[in-house]
Amino acid sequence: MALLSIRNLTVEFATASGSFRAVDGVDVAVEAGDILAIVGESGSGKSVSMLALMGLLPWTATVTADEMSFDGQDLRKLAPRTRRRIIGKDIAMIFQEPMSSLNPCFTVGFQIKEGLKKHMGLDARAREARALDLMEMVGIPDPARRLNAYPHQLSGGMSQRVMIAMAIACRPRLLIADEPTTALDVTIQAQIIDLLTELQAETGMALILITHDMGVVAETARRVSVQYAGQKVEEQPVGPLFATPHHPYTSALLAALPERATTRLLPTIPGVVPGQFDRPGGCLFAPRCAFADDLCRTTPPPVQAPDLGLARCHHPLEGRA
Amino acid sequence: MIRYLLSRLLTFLPTFLGVTLISFAFIRVLPGDPIIVMAGERGLTEERYAELYRQFGFDQPLPVQFWNYLTGVLQGDLGTSYVTKRPVWDEFFALFPATLELSLCAIVFAIAIGLPAGVIAAVNRGKLFDRALMSTALVGYSMPIFWWALLLIIVFSGNLGWTPVSGRMDLIYYFPQVTGFMLIDSLLSGQNGAFASAVRHLILPTIVLGTIPLAVIARQTRSAMLEVLSEDYIRTARAKGLSPLRVNGLHALRNAMIPVITVIGLSVGTLLAGAILTETIFSWPGIGKWMVDSIFRRDYPVVQGGLLLIASMVMVVNLTVDILYGLINPKIRARK
């Protein structure tokens, strides 16, 4: 049985101009110890679906799903209080902006120990020791002094390390990293990704990595789920996905990688992800797709078989793109 | 921190001088002559008038008068009241505890209700409680204080007879004023019922004086909380599985306190200085009433000295607020 299993997840936001569907029938399944990358452009609903799992969406959001279970427990049926025993303990999450994700009013140590007290019931001395261990695990030099530091005294990379220390404090079985390197310097990005994969290997936790960096995906993930405009359009193990993408969108994303460029100008995907008002009637990707025909423009595509990467496409690509 | 304090204290100097000058000028610009006012209906002879005129130093040019006043102030001498012949300092310290007691009760009342109400409204934004509270706060803020006071007196003192109409203590109790605070002195006196009487006298003035600060604090807390609640670190706190009480009451409120502390500081300043209406309506023997009486009597030293002391207190409160900022948010401390 999968550690995390989400079927047909839909998230709608109530806005002044009507409801907006940010996530549209997404399935996510993660086995224990797996590394899943969720990729897609901005606005494809990657973060929103994970925030929905964490119960962190604002009150304007309506979340529905046919199934949302973690370790056999149906998260939809849990009372908020019970759910909070899982959130932050068994499922932890780190975010895009480490600098603003730490509370400026409290020391790093306080913020790390908070979860330890709530979920692990450790006494003050044990919390201190565990916090020191964690700071060392995430590679923060001079941890004893840094525990008493305030967030504004740390760099962005250090802050993200602290966020990771906080997230893994209670030995989670699933860590969700929501674009953990987007706000960081390029040199720091690699360090943070390395740290995450090391910690994953050490602890055996499952990792969901939300990113739009295909390079990171290739190095880190075992499976890749591609999202577009709130829908999952393809899912494959990382090797086959890079070798034979079945959805034209995946193929176009890969073609835009600098390493794969064959011309001097980098190929791009024309247009933008459809928003609230310009959602096409048929396939959501049709307006930007090089292979689209009349069928694509009028009829929503079916989900293909697993050997075609579950591609949500009328005309899945078969060979190498 | 010490350096910051010293630099702040230095900025007090020009403010202090300015207040001295303004209070000196302000009372002299008012029409009316203190000697005539003192003489009252009886009137007085030309010679006596000239004698007093010289005695009060009015025959000297205004700059000289100001200089004399200023040198006095710098030596700690605020002058003597024309009317009571007592030093301004003594009068101030006899009356100030009454004002301080009332102001403290009012601000505690305002914070105790306004802060939680604002937090609850922000957490439940758009819901019934939020809307009801914000409308009530607007009414409270817009209500003329004297009318509100009279309304409360009519209902609670007049119709229901629950609270006294005025004063600080029932006349049947008499005890020495050790601290000047009725709540403490009545307890020290050990007289049965004295403390209860002090509390009963405080209730209505506290509510009246605390109403506007309460409304301001509630609205400010709500808007500050709304801003903070959308911050990333609140999401982090919730992602740790912390209870809403801890997320809202600790992580959010502490950050929201900066603007709230500011309005609390401003309120304390205005309460100390501006309890005038409330003190007058409830015959509360504090400095508000003292200032009003002194202005009517054209009691120059008292008005000047009183204004100066009130301004100094406001400055001290503001300094305290600045120090509190740094204690609440270490980032601010570092920037200074």
Image (cartoon, rainbow, N blue to C red):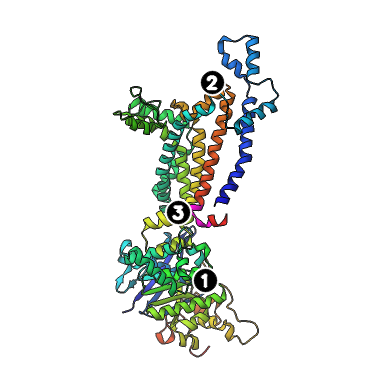
Rounded to the nearest angstrom, the CA distance separating label 3 from label 1 is 25 Å
Which numbered tag is attached to residue B254?
Answer: 3
Q: Residues within 10 Å of mark 3 (few under 14, many from 20)?
A: some
In what element is the residue under mark 3?
helix
> Would you name the residue on which mark 2 appears?
B85
Q: Residues within 10 Å of mark 1 (few under 14, many from 20)?
A: many
Q: Which label's residue is closer to the chain start, 2 or 3?
A: 2
Q: What is the span of residues highlighted in magenta in the rendered image? A: B326-331
Give the label, 2 or 1, closer to the camera: 2
Q: Residues within 10 Å of mark 2 (few under 14, many from 20)?
A: few
In what element is the residue under mark 1?
helix
B329 part of magenta stretch? yes
> Would you name the residue on which mark 1 appears?
A157
- Looking at the picture, does residue B123 appear above or below residue B305? below
Q: Residue B263: tell me if it is visible.
A: yes
Q: Nearer the viewer, residue B80 or A119?
A: B80
The location of residue B19, given as percent across then percent down, is: 61, 35
Residue type for callout 3: Arg
Give the letter of the chain under mark 2. Answer: B
Q: Residue at x 59, y 76 (%)?
A: A270
Residue type for callout 1: Gly
Q: Residue at x 64, y 86 (%)?
A: A263
Q: Quadrant of residue B135?
A: top left
